[in-house]
Image (tube, rainbow, N blue to C red):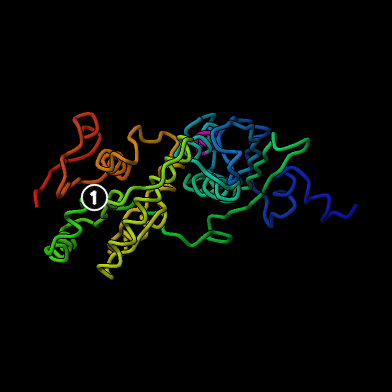
Amino acid sequence: MTDDIRLAFAHPSERAEASSKTPCDRISLRDYVVEVEIGAFQQERGTLQRVRFNVVVEVSPLGPIDDDVDRILSYDRVTEAIGVELEAERINLLETLAARVAERILLEPQAERVFVRIEKLDRGPFALGVEIVRARDGQNTDGQDHSEAPHPRVVYLSNAAIAAPHLTGWIDQLAAKDAPLIICVGAAEAAAPQAANALAQRRIDLLAIEQNAWQLAALDRRCMVVGTRTELDWAMKNDQICIWAPSKIVLDAVDGPSASPRDAVALVAWFAAEMQAKELLVIGADAPDAAMSARAVDVTTREL
C-alpha cells in the first residue's frame, strides 16, 4: 500500500502530521459520537442516526502554559463547536456540517488549521463519511463573509396589501428605513391541494406561500425571493430587499415553529424571532397572538 493510500484512510492526526510543513502542537477529538437528524434523503427526516466526529486542531504555540487552562484551546471548545452547528439548523450534507464546524473552530485565537472527519454509522454495515481541512490563512475556505448579519425589519403583507395600489410606495418607504427589509406573505386566496398525510400537507402549505412570494416578486423587480439563511444574511449585508420563501428554513429548523403554515402571521412571528428582527410590521392583518408576539421585537400593525 502506498503512503498516499494509507494516509487517505488514516486518522486525521496522522494526515495532519504528514502534511504539516513546520512542527506544531495538535489537539484531537477522537470517535465522538452523537445522535442527530441529518441527511438529504426523505427517509432520513424525522429519525435520528449516529454520527461520528474525529477532529484534529493544529494550534499556535503561546509560550509557557504554566498549567493554566485559559492559555490553551480546550477540548470543550471543539465539542461545543459541533454542538452549536448541530443545534443551529437541520443540515442535509456532511460536507456542510464539516465546513461549519471547521470554520467555528478557526474562530478560536489559538487554532491555525483543522482537520474534520464526519461519518454516518447507521446507513449500512459500513461508515459513510467526509473529511476536510481548513486553515486560518484562508486556504480551502468558502470565501463567505461570516461577520454578524444586521437585524432586519420583517414586514408581513396580507393579500389585500399585496393588491393595494400603495404597494410600491410602501416598499419605497420601508426600504429607505434604517434596517434591511424582509417581506413575508401567506398563501394566495386560491385553495391549496389537500392531502391526508400531515407532513405532506405541511409541505404543500409552505409551497403555497412560496408561490405567493414569487407572485409578489413579479410585481416589484427590486424584491428577490430567498429561502436560505446564508442567502438572507448576504442579502441583508448588501441592501437587497428579500421576500421569504419559508420551506427550507422551517423544515430544517431544529426547534421548528409550532404554528401551522396556514397561520401565516404566527409563522412570520417565529421567523422574525429567529432572525432577531428589530421590528415585525403586520400590514393588513391582525397581529399574532400574545405568545408569538413575545418572541419577536416591537410587533406593530398597520391597517390598509
In percent of the image, x 60 and y 38: which residue is there?
A: 44
Pointer 1 local density, CA inside 10 Å: few below 14, some 14–19, many at least 20: many
In the displayed structure image, the side of residue 196 where residue 298 appears, left or right: left
Residue 54 at what x, y percent from top left?
A: 66, 39
Number of callouts in the render? 1
Q: What amino acid type is highlighted by mark number 1?
A: Val
In percent of the image, x 63 and y 43: which residue is there?
A: 25
Residue 261 is inside the magenta segment: no
Image height check: is 132 above or below 261? below
Residue 76 at what x, y percent from top left?
A: 53, 31
In the displayed structure image, the side of residue 268 where residue 167 appears, left or right: left
| Residue ranking furthest to the right | 1
Main SS of the magenta part reads helix
Residue 157 at what x, y percent from top left?
A: 21, 52
Label 1 residue SS: strand
Residue 1 at what x, y percent from top left?
A: 90, 52
Image height check: is 164 above or below 26? below
* Residue stretch rendered in magenta on the structure: 77-81
Depth check: 264 or 292 in front? Answer: 264
Depth check: 191 or 226 in front? Answer: 191
Question: In terms of image quadrants, where is residue 269?
Answer: top left
Residue 80 is inside the magenta segment: yes
Depth check: 135 or 119 in front? Answer: 119
Residue identified by numbered label 1: 154
Depth check: 266 or 22 in front? Answer: 266
Question: In terms of image quadrants, where is residue 173?
Answer: bottom left
Image height check: is 232 above or below 298? below
